[in-house]
Amino acid sequence: MIERQQPRSHSWTRRWWQAAFVLLLMATFVFGIVPEASAAALYLLTDGITTVVTGTDRVDSSRILLAGAAEGSTDVILESGKKVTIRHNGAEQYATSRSGEHVSELLQREGVSIGPLEMVRVNLANSDILLEIDSDFTYYETAVEAAAFQTVQNTDYTLPKGETKVTQQGVDGFADVTYEVVYADGALVSRQAVAVSGSTAVNEIVSVGTLVKEAQPGDVIAEVVRNNDGSGYLIMKSGDSLHFTGSMDVKCTAYTAGESRVGTITATGTTVHVGVVAVDRSVIPLGTTMFVTTADGSYTYGMGHAEDTGVRGKVVDLYMNSRSECIQFGRRSSVVYFLDD
């Protein structure tokens, strides 16, 4: 048998049941009032939101609550004139409660016999009363419980890699926790949470930085984020980010040492190597750090430094290790992004 989940609007009723439970426990410990279990069957009492268990010493004492029961009994006194549906052994029969009548008296009057391992589930959720008799019950109940905030991490391409920053403080709250409860042969088998909803906790948001000074070898651009002033960020496929102060559309060529009397020492005195870029110093100042890629993204040269000269205008010459690489590259429309030094 499966009980539907109840809406949150009934939370005040649930709190009343919980308050009654606390008062009962206080009475038990202060005055020593411990009602004896006199019914032969286990009674599961429910108002449609909270289910309490009475009628057997096999149930943990923390779950025993004599809600609406006469003192010294684990039975329930019914209101007069209530329509009662009794489900037992796959059949249904109907009755009307009498004034001051106990559930056990109504069942006896209707000729319903309860086995020693059977349970009676008294459902008071509606105006009519439902009595379900079975040796196995699976139902769902919802409780309001404390809910701890969760920590959510977001990447921040403006924050240096490895640094973190809390952008929203977490706040604990409360949530509706739905439990699946299983009884078999008069005993509790399991009670486990299966759903959490309506949490009032506020997640803590932590930004994790991805900003680096240089791209990893072979890394390519996944996205370009531009600001209104022409600066922006390169979001790399690796997850790293690079800040650029500006960009320029250029024509790219390639050169290598030993071809066309090219030596091994650059105009700035460094030794040629992959990453050296020859520029027109009146267009791109020597010492500029850049990231170079073709306009269509089909070829990425990657990190480059303006260390050599020998070209004119918006042209950059990329150093490569071999003549065959230079020939294969040829001349391509490209974009250079000027990075922070």
Image (spheres, rainbow, N blue to C red):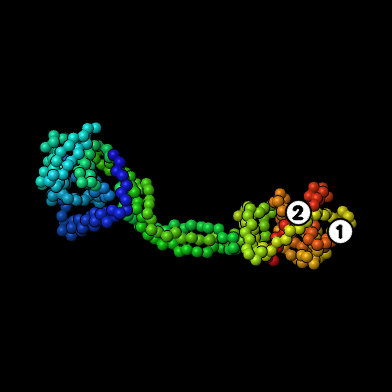
Would residue 271 be visible to someone looking at this image?
Answer: no
Residue at 20% across / 55% down in the picture? 24
Residue at image location 38% in from the left, 52% down from the top: 197
Q: Residue furthest top?
A: 90
Depth check: give the residue in front, 23 or 304: 304
* Residue appearing at x 56%, y 63% in the figure: 163
Q: Residue furthest right?
A: 261
Residue beneath disc 2: 333
Q: Quadrant of the C terminus?
A: bottom right
23 vs 231, nearest the viewer: 231
According to the picture, the residue beneath numbered tag 1 turns out to be: 263
Task: Say left or right for 304 vs 194.
Answer: right
* Extreme-left residue of the structure: 99
| Label 2: which secondary element | strand
* Label 1 Cα neighbours within 10 Å, binned few <14 / some 14-19 / many ≥20: few
* Residue at 67% across, 55% down: 216
Q: Quadrant of residue 180?
A: top left
Q: Residue 129: in sight, yes or no?
A: yes
Q: How many marks?
A: 2
Q: Amino acid at mark 2?
A: Ser
Residue 90's place in the image compared with 168, above or below, is above
Please indicate whether residue 83 sits to the left or right of residue 229 in the image.
left
Instruction: Answer with the quarter of the image where residue 283 lies.
Output: bottom right
Q: Position of residue 278 (x, y in %)?
A: 80, 60
**Three-letter residue code for mark 1:** Gly
Tell me the SS state at disc 1.
loop
x, y percent for residue 210: 59, 59
Closer to the camera, 213 or 243?
243
